[in-house]
Image (cartoon, rainbow, N blue to C red):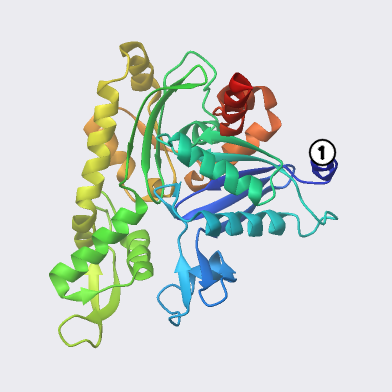
Amino acid sequence: MFNNIFGKFSRDLGVDLGTANTLVYCKDKGIIINEPSVVAVNQRTGQIVAVGHAAKDMIGKTPPHIATVKPLVAGIISDFEVTEKMLKFFIEKSHKDGFNILPRPRIVIGVPLDLTEVERKAVEDASLNAGARQVFLVEEPMAAAIGARLPITEPIGNMVVDIGGGTTEIAVISLSGVVTWKSLPIAGDEMNKNVIMFAKENFNLLLGERVAENIKMRIGSAMQLEEPLSMEMRGRDMVTGLPKEIMVNDSQVREALARSVRAIVENIKAALEITPPELVADIYERGIVLTGGGALLKGLDKVISRAAEIPVRVADDPLTCVVRGTGILLEETELLNTIALPSSQETAGDTRSMYA
């Protein structure tokens, strides 16, 4: 009863709980939070020191008693308590300018396709403990397709490739359901590791994660660029132990990323091979849609198009497709009830009633 009363004064939220970034969509206000999924914790007291951008700025720069934690790995909760505190922080932040002392919002959260029952329960429990009164879980490629305004409710094949921080999810969607899918743990974070490994093997240079990510974003590409790009790469020389700077070009970074790009392309082709022919015909006509931060890698759409011989386009603002999809679902209750995953709370309730 109290939950319902508090709920009247709470704002319903759509959340993209990503490995790299967490985005929050507020009903009637749009995207209000876009922050890294990083939390800084004081290990002596267990207190949260910083969340989001402030915590990301601390990575690799903290004293021993402060740990910077990424509570999600491959889109799955790896640290339950920290995830709960992070969600609570974002819920409270989204209600900061309101009158509610104890926000109890309805929350729609995007989750990976290959989530197990236990992992699903972990997401629900973390959200409820953080202050949600009701939680709906939606598969991320489905939310991304809705955010990209694809006609997912019609009997038409829609192929979405969501390249996030921890996972790449490939899904063929028709009639409000995922028909075939593939999920692989190769995405933005793996590409950052590729750049770090390349610098280590070729230049004896030890890079930080943020430096590698910056290089990937600025000059990384999947195919040859019309105009060559270059930038400085700064790190620690593994031979002398001293700071060192070298110049790298887009060709070298492309070589570093080639293995990850090839894996994504091969998995897209493998997903097409197991897709029913009627849907393949639709996809051939309508093309593949890329969403997620990884879709911004220069030339990736052209490389996939050339390999699969199908048109490929990058969705408008691919970084926010999933959270925009969850926001649309907040408005469309009927569609939300159709595509939301069964709640582990309900399942537990059904089991209890069986033995009552």
Residue 351 x/y as whole percent: 57, 24
Mark 1 Cα shell of 10 Å, populated few (<14), some (14-19), many (≥20):
few
Point 14% across, 69% down: residue:
202
* Residue situated furthest front in the rendering: 356
Point 27% across, 53% down: residue:
226
Q: Is residue 54 left or right of residue 71?
A: right
Q: Is residue 20 left or right of residue 149?
A: left
Q: Which of 134 and 17 is in front in this view?
A: 134
Look at the picture and state if 49 lies above or below 272: below
- Name the residue tied to disc 1: 4
Q: What residue type is labelled 1?
A: Asn
Can residue 338 be spotted in the picture? yes
Q: Which quarter of the rendered picture does the C terminus lie within?
A: top right
Look at the picture and state if 18 lies above or below 252: above
Residue 302 x/y as whole percent: 29, 40
Residue 314 x/y as whole percent: 42, 40
Point 61% across, 54% down: residue:
87
Point 30% across, 47% down: residue:
186
Res 242 → quadrant:
bottom left
Q: Is residue 179 left or right of residue 151?
A: left
Q: What element carries label 1?
A: helix
Q: Which quarter of the rendered picture does the N terminus lie within?
A: top right
